[in-house]
Amino acid sequence: MPFDLERAASQLRDRHPDLAAFRPTLLDLLFATGCMVGETAAALAGGDAVVVRAAGPAAPSLQPPLVVVVVDTDPPHLASVRSALGPAMWPAPLAALGGPPLAIAWAAAIRVLASSTSRRPWRALYFRGPADGLGDYVQAELGHLEDDATIVQLVPSATPGQDVHAGAASLAWVDLCRPRNVWRFPACDQSYALTGQVHWESALGPLRAMLDGLDARLDWTLHDVHLYYGASVQLSAVLRTSEPIEAATAGFSLREVEAGQRLMFPINDALAALPSLAGRLGGAWGEGLGRPLHLHALPDGLRVAFLADGEPPEVLPERLGSLTIEWRSAPLVEPARAPAEAIAVDASETLGAIAAGVVAGGGAVWQVPALGQSAELAGFARGLDAVLNRHLGS
């Protein structure tokens, strides 16, 4: 066999969060197989994307190529997370969109394909990049394939016991910005590092509860807010107050920090505007804005990323009070057009969320195991070997 799958899976899990270390690891595995390898980088709206291509021998064949695709979507907060609390990841209903299981499934497919003696041509494409634009990029790249190519997308099973976002959805971003940073906030001399872990369905609720629990006579400003999903939901900020406070509420912790440290302008105005903005949107977009996937402070306001079901409202607000509002969205999740073919999964396992791009381009879906830390890789490899060789005709 070209490489040891257990060892390869361990390396891919360890290095996946750091793209600079992950990319050469993946390429080393491919070079060990002796198959043809190519790599292309692209600059998307949300950052850099990469597609790694592997292919079998270019032998003459009248059969259409089999194209195995993995779309490994980075969450919107990956590049901005530098935390001892662990790497950023998708929340459980979206966990199948990106992460080590996708890379491991693709490596297992390469291992089988490179060992096949079939004369049917095959290709394997691994896409990785930001949620902002990756789906459209994948669909465009697949449009260059032969019209008769058989395209399949490997999608991990969902986390046991978790709901799955199975319908079509986009990832939406909204920036709430003030036209100029004129200081219109109270003067506060006490500074505290604020950290806490919150829940997926109510990310902003605990923060609002903590702020509402402060003494009504106390002035405060909130700076450098950052919310992201890891093993749990992490929220950090700097809270400045007009008088010392002893403890936070609603599960947050406080640590006094240097009062003179350099901070971005406070986001009191943008944070206060979010409920009003969600109410104006209404429907699924309004609900999504109320449970953001990511928050971070901008030099002149606040950026919010959220899961947006269905079509956007006909009119998106461009202003709210003194704040200007800018929007964008990109396809994130799409439903399967036909039942998925299951590989080494049992009846209790549910198909995870399907990353956008492949199904829209005419591809089918193969469901693979979640491939967590304790995954039974040998059983999965046997199942994948049987399915791939059946499709290859060997």
Image (tube, rainbow, N blue to C red):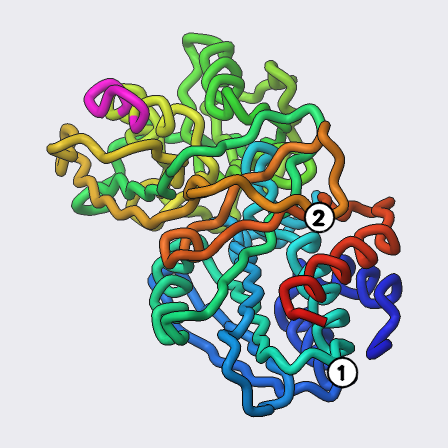
Residue 142: give x, y in percent of width and height: 40, 68
Residue 211: give x, y in percent of width and height: 47, 18
In which quadrant of the rendered image does the N terminus lie? bottom right
Q: State left or right for residue 180 relative to residue 366.
A: left
Is residue 308 a member of the stretch shown in magenta? no
- Residue at label 1? 33
Q: Residue at x 52, y 74 (%)?
A: 65
- Mark 2, Cα crowd under 10 Å, few <14 / some 14-19 / many 20+, is many
Q: What span is colored magenta in the figure?
A: 278-285
Residue closest to the eye, 16 or 93: 93
Residue 364: give x, y in percent of width and height: 49, 52
Q: Amino acid at mark 1?
A: Thr
Seen in the picture, residue 332 relative to 256 is either above or below; the reply is: below
Q: Residue at x 24, y 44 (%)?
A: 327
- Residue at label 2? 343
Residue closest to the eye, 164 or 305: 164
